[in-house]
Image (cartoon, helix red, strand yellow):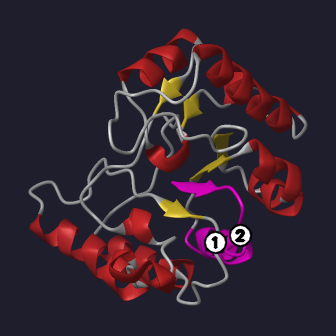
Amino acid sequence: MFSGGDYADGCSTIVDVLNEHNVKAHFFFTGDFYRMKKECVQKLINDNHYLGAHSDKHLLYASWENRDELLITKDEFVEDLSNNYKEMEKFGIEKDDALYFMPPYEWYNQTIADWTNELGLQLISFTPGTRSNADYTIPSMGDRYVSSEEVYNSIINFEKENMYGLNGFHLFLHAGTHPERTDKFYNKLDKLLSELKTRDYQFKLLNEK
């Protein structure tokens, strides 16, 4: 799974690697991404990847300090998500084609899950256990910065140490990152997919029968 908001620098590399490995992936983009990164979006549509919503303006739904403390109203939630889908419709992506929704920042609570369900959508997020979601971090974050080698090793080590390996795992990455991060993890995507294939993993879409 990949998300995208402000940056799409990894799009071409990701598309090429996925094609080389004959892998389909999920891409969850903000409305702004659909507005501004049309070339990337069209490439993914042409290659039959899953494209979904990630909120229109990448809102923070709940407080970082108290997850149960909402920062938006239901009306704001519905309007923002509706605007996201309106942008997707411009590419021919109807709501019924994209019922899986990844919340912005991958940060939500039960109320957000309930509101999502009321809209006929299914909220999903990444599987915890690796550092893949930290591939966006930049050196100026100090101790929070995670190198691409650390991200890669965390995935491989989890696969080795977990009883079920990566079976059923939702691996989450970003389609692009801030220019300050020159150590781009998407440049290791080919190595990662090659390694996982040697371990007999297959990659499937959530809506794949």
Helix, strand or loop at mark 2: helix
Helix, strand or loop at mark 1: helix
Please tell me the numbered disc located at residue 209: none
Q: Is residue 126 above or below residue 146?
A: above
Q: Residue at x 38, y 28 (%)?
A: 109
Q: Position of residue 52 (x, y in %)?
A: 65, 40
The quarter holding residue 59 reads top right
The quarter holding residue 198 reads bottom left
Read off the residue under disc 2.
11
Q: Position of residue 192 (x, y in %)?
A: 41, 78
Q: Is residue 127 left or right of residue 115?
A: left
Please name whichever residue, 97 or 105, is drawn nearer the observer in this view of the structure.
105
Q: Is residue 207 left or right of residue 200?
A: right
The quarter holding residue 156 reads bottom left
Please name whichever residue, 190 or 150, is drawn nearer the observer in this view of the structure.
150
Circles 1 and 2, Cβ within 8 Å, touching? The answer is: yes
Span of residues in magenta: 1-21
Q: Position of residue 100 (x, y in %)?
A: 55, 32
Residue 121 part of the magenta segment: no
Read off the residue under disc 1.
14
Q: Is residue 59 above or below residue 130?
A: above
Q: Residue at x 61, y 85 (%)?
A: 180
